[in-house]
């Protein structure tokens, strides 16, 4: 695998040197957006090398340099930068549409003849979001009440009042922790369907 990285590094360095010399000689090339297409996953050495090369070459060329990372396949976009953006946005929309269609289909039962124990029905994403929003409001309210009670506690001079405020702060801390734990559970429940 490392020989691919070395090969890619050599190609990029060579291309940079040749193109920078060519640009200096003619002054007209490249005259449009340059795309480096990396046929390896993102955050790998070829991706990093291509990005470093793009950062170094773009200012000297005076044109945008785009690094396209494609996991195992390369797409050639014809036309200018606007056509490229249109194609990429169309791919994104198509991918989201496919994901939505795939998620909307009911799951296929594993076996038809066996009966399984009834499963608890999953709550809809909307119900989870609604409860999370209500919990966020409750957490904000408890947090504000706790802040005010703590401020009063710090200013209290009467021992009985200080004890009452201390108990109130402790109770609010417990309620706040319970609400935050429930919010985290809902966050995990909502994320499990993704």
Image (cartoon, rainbow, N blue to C red):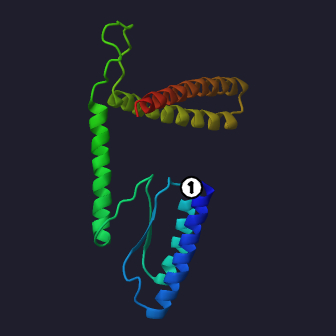
- Residue 74: x %, y % from top left: 39, 59
- Residue 33: x %, y % from top left: 38, 75
In depth, the one of 126 and 44 nearer the eye is 44
Q: Residue 130 occupies which quadrant of the picture?
A: top left
Q: How would you rate the neighbour count of disc 1 (Cα within 10 Å): few for under 14, some for 14-19, many for 20 or more?
A: few
Q: How many marks?
A: 1
The secondary element bearing badge 1 is classed as loop
- Residue 47: x %, y % from top left: 53, 60
Residue at left offset 58%, top offset 33%? 146
Residue at left offset 54%, top offset 27%? 181
In depth, the one of 31 and 132 nearer the eye is 31
Residue at left offset 38%, top offset 8%? 116
**Quadrant occupied by the C terminus:** top left
In depth, the one of 2 and 157 nearer the eye is 2
Left of 94 or right of it: where is 70? right
**Quadrant occupied by the N terminus:** bottom right
Left of 156 or right of it: where is 52? left
Residue at left offset 48%, top offset 93%? 25
- In this picture, is 91 found above or below 136? below
In depth, the one of 75 and 129 nearer the eye is 75
Look at mark 1 in the image and give the residue it sits on.
Answer: 44
Q: Residue 4 occupies which quadrant of the picture?
A: bottom right
Q: Residue 134 occupies which quadrant of the picture?
A: top left
- In this picture, is 180 found above or below 74? above
- Residue 188: x %, y % from top left: 48, 30
- In this picture, is 182 found above or below 14? above
Left of 87 or right of it: where is 16? right
């Amino acid at each position: 695998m490392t020989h691919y990285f070395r090969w890619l590094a050599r190609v990029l360095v060579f291309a940079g040197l040749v193109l920078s010399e060519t640009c200096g000689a003619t002054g007209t090339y490249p005259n449009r957006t340059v795309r480096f297409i990396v046929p390896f996953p993102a955050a790998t050495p070829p991706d990093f090398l291509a990005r470093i090369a793009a950062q170094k070459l773009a200012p000297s060329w005076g044109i945008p340099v785009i690094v396209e990372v494609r996991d195992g396949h390369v797409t050639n976009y014809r036309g200018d930068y606007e056509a490229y953006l249109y194609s990429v946005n169309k791919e994104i929309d198509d991918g989201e549409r496919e994901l939505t269609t795939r998620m909307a289909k009911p799951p296929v039962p594993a076996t038809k003849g066996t009966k399984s124990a009834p499963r608890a029905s999953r709550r809809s994403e909307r119900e989870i979001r609604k409860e999370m929003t209500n919990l966020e409001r409750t957490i904000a309210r408890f947090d504000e009440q706790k802040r005010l009670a703590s401020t009063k506690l710090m200013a209290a001079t009467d021992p009985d009042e200080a004890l009452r405020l201390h108990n109130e702060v402790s109770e609010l801390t417990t309620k706040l922790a319970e609400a935050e734990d429930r919010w985290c559970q809902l966050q995990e429940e909502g994320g499990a369907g993704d």
